[in-house]
Amino acid sequence: MLNMLMTSEYAPAEERHRLQRMLLRVAEGEREALAELYRHTRAAVYGLALSYLKNAHDAQDLTQDVYVQVWDCAQQYRPTGSPIGWLLTVCRSLCLMRLRREKNNAALSEEEWDAIPAQACGLDADERILLQQALGSLAEEERRIVLLHAVTGMKHREIAALLELPLPTVLSKYHRALKKMRSTLEGDDAR
């Protein structure tokens, strides 16, 4: 199912080619390419890690681990696949390994939400607090889908492939989550 994410149809061609060149340069041992790759992809990797780990500190640590893994394994990347898909697959694998190891199911706190880079959201402090409260009203999988779509900018089809869920399920959970969030923001407890 992750093969669907690895296909080139999901990423804009220019961005995909730029990330592919960066990964190929990383495979050749260029540290500057790794730094450039980090700058271009860290929000997506961090957003996915946060959606799984629900802890900002753990997500930040795991984001760093992803780039260490990329440095060590860049030779395994094949330019026929999606570079962001490959990165997010590395991230997902590390998240699942950590969750299995630690059995971490803590809720996303306000402090953890505040650790999401402000520029990634484009929200002021009050809006971020309201959004965090609305996200708190969601089930874990709904929150993960919303965060993946909003923070990383992934398309629903990409999210379905990454989470290994049917596309209709992702769409249904996403729309249900939006209704719950709207209800929370409007002060209506009916879900």
Image (cartoon, rainbow, N blue to C red):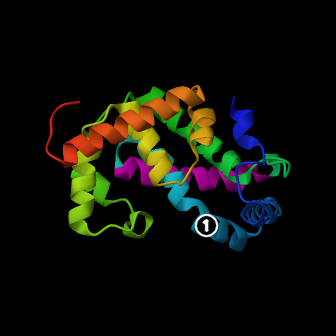
Q: Does residue 84 sit above or below 38 in this rendering?
A: above
- Mark 1 packing: few (<14 Cα in 10 Å), some, or many (20+)? some
* Residue located beneath label 1 in the image: 40
- The residue nearer to you, when weighing 176 against 53, is 176
- The residue nearer to you, when weighing 53 against 83, is 83
Task: State which region is magenta.
Answer: 56-74
- Report whether 152 appears left or right of 13: left
Q: How far across and how far down the image is residue 33, in percent? A: 72, 70
Q: How far across and how far down the image is residue 46, in percent? A: 48, 53
Q: How far across and how far down the image is residue 144, in percent? A: 43, 39
Say which quarter of the image contains residue 93.
top right
- Report whether 57 appears left or right of 2: left
Mainly helix, strand or loop, the magenta region? helix
Q: Is residue 70 visible?
A: yes
Residue 61 lies within the magenta run: yes
Q: Does residue 20 sit above or below 135 in this rendering?
A: below
Quadrant that contains the N terminus? top right
Q: Going 26% across and 51% down the picture, which residue do you hit?
A: 132
Q: Is residue 108 visible?
A: no
- Report whether 157 appears left or right of 99: right
Q: Does residue 29 sit above or below 185 in this rendering?
A: below
User: What kind of residue is marked 1?
Assistant: His
Q: Going 76% across and 48% down the picture, which residue do you hit?
A: 9
Residue 21 lies within the magenta run: no
- The residue nearer to you, when weighing 187 against 150, is 187
Q: The residue tagged with tag 1: helix, strand or loop? A: helix
Q: Does residue 3 sit above or below 17 in this rendering?
A: above
- The residue nearer to you, when weighing 183 against 161, is 183
Quadrant that contains the C terminus? top left
Q: Going 40% across and 47% down the picture, which residue do you hit?
A: 58
